[in-house]
């Protein structure tokens, strides 16, 4: 039974990181759609400001979701979601040419990655005063 408990813990951790990533994908898709979808360097300043806000909120949401579902090690699980964002960015940037400079795409991904880890930190801060809080017991 200890190995079953360990396997379930690993699955929960992987599921937490994937759920955080899914939250990011859904939030960015919903948030960028009214802004025209993919944001390019030549977009108006207003669109850049709103897109940055969408990326930050989406990353925070993804980090919080990962940390909440994991129920432990919130920063580690948020970083797991951020790793999925990084992997997706690498695949996208290496598979097709972008209309924008590389630095623009990298900074966009970095915004999501940092905000995602910050979401894990936010969750850790929110529940740190509540000893033994685990909304999804293991």
Image: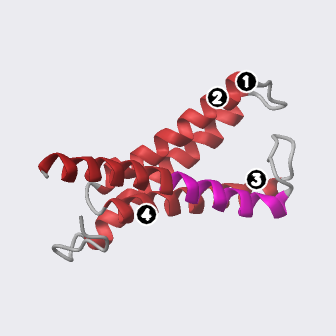
User: Residue at the front extreme?
Assistant: 1
| Coordinates of residue 46 in the picture (x, y in percent) | 81, 59
Q: Is residue 33 magenta?
A: yes
Q: Which residue is mark 4?
A: 64
Numbered label attached to residue 57: none
First of labels 1, 4 by sequence position: 4
Q: Which residue is mark 1?
A: 95
Residue at (30%, 47%) from the top-left corner?
10
Left or right, 138 with reference to 123: left
State which region is magenta: 20-35
Q: Viewer-nearest of labels 3 and 1?
A: 1
**The C terminus: image quadrant:** bottom left
**Which of 31 and 56 lies nearest the eye of the viewer?**
31
Alpha carbon separation for disc pair 3 and 1: 25 Å
User: Residue at the left extreme?
Assistant: 2
Q: Is residue 57 magenta?
A: no
First of labels 3, 4 by sequence position: 3
Q: Which residue is mark 3?
A: 48
Left or right, 10 with reference to 84: left
Residue at (43%, 50%) from the top-left corner?
17
Alpha carbon separation for disc pair 3 and 4: 24 Å
Q: Which residue is mark 2?
A: 91
Q: Are marks 1 and 2 in contact (CB under 8 Å)?
A: yes
First of labels 2, 4 by sequence position: 4
Chief secondary structure of the magenta portion: helix
Query: Callout 3: few (<14), some (14-19), or many (20+) C-alpha neighbours within 10 Å?
Result: some
């Amino acid at each position: 039974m200890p190995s079953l408990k360990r396997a379930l813990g690993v699955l929960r951790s992987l599921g937490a990181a994937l759920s955080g990533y899914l939250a990011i994908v859904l939030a960015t898709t919903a948030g960028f759609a009214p802004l025209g979808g993919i944001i390019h360097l030549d977009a108006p300043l207003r669109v850049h400001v709103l897109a940055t806000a969408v990326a930050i909120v989406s990353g925070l949401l993804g980090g919080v979701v990962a940390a909440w579902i994991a129920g432990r090690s919130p920063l580690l699980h948020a970083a797991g979601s951020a790793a999925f964002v990084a992997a997706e960015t690498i695949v996208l940037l290496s598979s097709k040419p972008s209309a924008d400079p590389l630095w623009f795409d990298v900074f966009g991904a970095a915004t999501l990655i940092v905000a995602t880890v910050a979401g894990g930190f936010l969750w850790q801060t929110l529940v740190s005063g509540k000893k033994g809080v685990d909304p999804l017991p293991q």
